[in-house]
Amino acid sequence: MNFICVACGIQHPDSDAPPDACPICEDERQYVPDGGQQWTTLEALRADHSNAIRPQRELTGIGTEPKFAIGQRALLVPYGAGNLLWDCITLLDDDTAAEIERRGGLEAIAISHPHYYSTMVEWAHRFDCPVHLHEADRRWAVREDPALRFWSGGTLDLGHGLTLIRGGGHFAGGTMLHWAGGDALLSGDIVQVIPDRRHVGFMYSYPNLIPLPEARVRAMVAMLEPFSFETIYGAWWDAIVAREGKAVVRRSAERYARALRGEMPPGA
Ligand SMILES: [Zn+2]
Ligand SMILES: [Zn+2]
């Protein structure tokens, strides 16, 4: 049985009994809920959850209802004759697979960071495609599989106008996807789209509110400098910066640095 952590949604290696703990949730960037560690399985999840598939501006979002685990939605991005799945969700069922096949299927999967590793191996097997992960986060890929392809360095050109960019920060291998055809950055929660849509956030831990050093934020912005992007697609339903994405990132990094230096916003 491949047990799934109810708190973060990651699927663990085959075992007879549930694992003792989930390393993703024991890490200080996540948490074990008040009630303690709980486990489920893909079969159980299929019984009482389903996936919504709906437009996210120029892309298609896929997310689970009711919300499961962290609650991110994945995105289908045009890629060659088919699609690339950006980030991943735990629930994969026949309806979802059929709808993705109808839209051209998956040529590849790429994931921003371990909080969204979910059931990536199930997806890779179902669509017979690779999963691109940054090797700096390899130890968090608890269910090993030959479909997992670990890349290294700062960028990876996937072809067809898609480029993976290592931003680091939230995780050492924290990755974003540049989609040249859509003049867009898909940022997971490496660069976090926040409610005002005129800024983004940068954190080491979002649920536990641990900030990043200024140097890490500046390094992330520098990695994005060669790329043009108007739109930023974040990790949640409708978390989208529609305009001036690159200026939004630059402006937000400056605001972040000012706060770390002890400068309060006007009126504070
Ligand atoms: Zn977990
Ligand atoms: Zn995260």
Image (tube, rainbow, N blue to C red):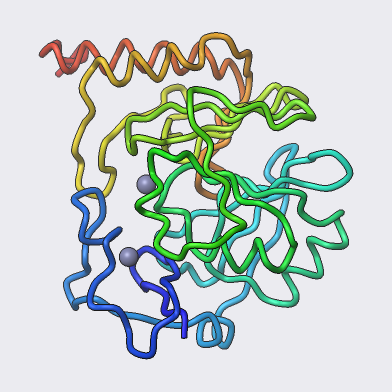
Compared across the picture, whether 241 is left or right of 216 comes to right
Most distant residue in the left direction: 262
Quadrant where ligand 1 appears: bottom left
In the foreground, 92 or 149: 149
Examine the rendered structure and indicate whether residue 69 appears above or below residue 135.
below
In the foreground, 153 or 222: 153
Q: How many marks?
A: 0
Q: Residue at x 81, y 57 (%)?
A: 105
Examine the rendered structure and indicate whether residue 100 appears above or below residue 149.
below
Q: Residue at x 74, y 62 (%)?
A: 127
Q: Position of residue 59 (x, y in %)?
A: 73, 42
Q: Position of residue 183 (x, y in %)?
A: 70, 21
Compared across the picture, whether 68 is left or right of 170 comes to right
In the foreground, 134 or 5: 134
Q: Position of residue 200 (x, y in %)?
A: 41, 27
Q: Position of residue 152 (x, y in %)?
A: 49, 31
Q: Residue at x 32, y 10 (%)?
A: 254
Quadrant in the picture for the C terminus: top left
Instruction: Examine the image and state in which quarter residue 203 appears.
Output: top left
Q: Residue at x 51, y 16 (%)?
A: 224
Compared across the picture, whether 43 is left or right of 52 comes to left
